[in-house]
Amino acid sequence: MIVPRNTSPVKGSTVLWIAAGFLLLVFGGLLIAELTPLLFPPQASAQAQQVDDLFKFMLAVGAAIFLLVQGVLVVAVVRFRARRGDRSDGAPMHGNTTLEVVWTLIPAVIVLVITIYSFQVWVNTTAARADEQTVRATGARFVWSFAYNDPVNNITINSKELHTYVGQPVRMEMSTDDSQHAFWIPAMRIKQDLLPGRTTEVRFTPTRAGSYPIVCAELCGSGHGQMRATIVVHPDEATYLSWFDDAVNTALNPPADPVERGRALLAAGVYPCSGCHVLDDLGWQGITGPSLNGVGDRAGRRVPGETAEEYLDRSIYFPGEYLVPGFGNLMPQFQPNDPNAPNYMPPDDHFAIVAYLCTLTASGESACDLDNLERIVSEYR
Ligand code: CUA
């Protein structure tokens, strides 16, 4: 009997095998997609749920394809391996239009579905909200700082931590004056680059109280790995406002003592010094700049002919002039006069910060003549 080519009946057992394999792929894909997110940080924002659902969908599809490819590979290796002594060629085969149509159409449909689904998630998670709160974030090598407007007193509140509360939609308005950074809050499932010369934004609505890490996700220099901060999500508006009112109070009533005022300015993260310097008094652990512990004792000895207050003054407004051995010229040059300049540091702040640095001595006594410092700083005013 002659059996014509390509018309051999498909056996019932083959259909069963294919069905079983298909079920295995679907089940395996779903299992991988369900188990993997157990490794994730908590879902702390309204965006997190949508992003994770999209991720799970893509992971399920990807895992099923992975299992299919690897499964076929294993079957082929086992079933069609060359038997001992078999030196013959395999059967000649050329082309299979049905197969090619199928393996083009299925991925095309999958990609189309993922495109539509992700676009929906993108639109949902980035949509502006009428009641949103705007917080400005600055990324600087290698520290984050956050600024809030206080419209009542017409002042800016600076903070090293990002504060908000459950249910409050937040819009981050972000800028950088040095290199590129990326603002990433893993628990909120949001990430956005900061680009020099541009303002970028990202939105999220916290749904879970607690403190979560903020991470820089763009290689920005040698201190990149240390460029982290914390977001504090207060449980409700009242607790958030009590933090905000405290911060407003502190800003409105700066300590009269310039040393205390300088310390408070640095502690609040108004300037990005903590990203690079070690300073035990404020808990700084930067590594890319010289240590500030005991800098008052060293300041008068660094440059011949310069007093401690002259040295500290010039180290901030003209950091490239003298470099501590072993460190490069990486520090931003702070500007005394132009409020719109990046790295603007008004002379009054400058005076207070230098006055504070002067007290970082073994004895705790100031190493500086503050009258002389006042004379120096008055020239910038
Ligand atoms: Cu900033 Cu990495």
Image (cartoon, rainbow, N blue to C red):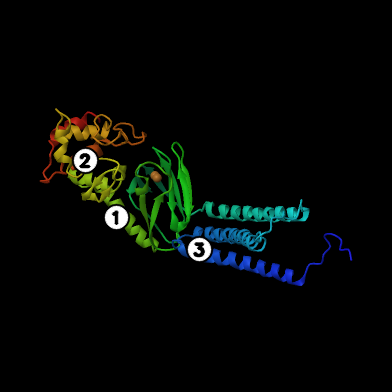
Q: Residue at x 15, y 38 (%)?
A: 298
Mark 1 neighbour class, 10 Å CA radius: few under 14, some 14 to 19, many 20 or more: few
Q: Is residue 154 visible?
A: no
Give left or right: position of 122 versus 39.
Answer: right
Residue 351: give x, y in percent of width and height: 21, 37
Mark number for residue 352? 2
Image position of 347 (left or right of 76) = left
Instruction: Calculate the distance from the C-alpha at mark 1 to the C-alpha at mark 3.
Output: 42 Å
Q: Position of residue 139 (x, y in %)?
A: 38, 44
Label 1 and label 2: CA atoms lie apart by 21 Å
Task: Name the residue at 22% across, 49% down.
Answer: 280
Looking at the picture, does residue 306 appear above or below residue 297? above
Classify the position of the N terminus by image quarter.
bottom right
Q: Is residue 283 visible?
A: yes
Q: Answer with mark 1 or mark 3, whichever residue precedes in sequence.
A: 3
Q: Nearer the viewer, mark 1 or mark 3?
A: 3
Taking depth in this image into account, of 269 and 226 the one nearest to the observer is 226
| Residue position for label 3 | 36
In front: label 1 or label 2: 2
Task: Say which residue label 1 marks.
Answer: 246
Q: Alpha-carbon neighbours of circle 2 within 10 Å: few (<14), some, or many (≥20)? A: many
Bin the neighbour count of mark 3 within 10 Å (Cα to Cα): few under 14, some 14-19, many 20 and up. few
Q: Is residue 169 above or below residue 174?
A: below
Point out the residue furthest to the front here.
Answer: 85
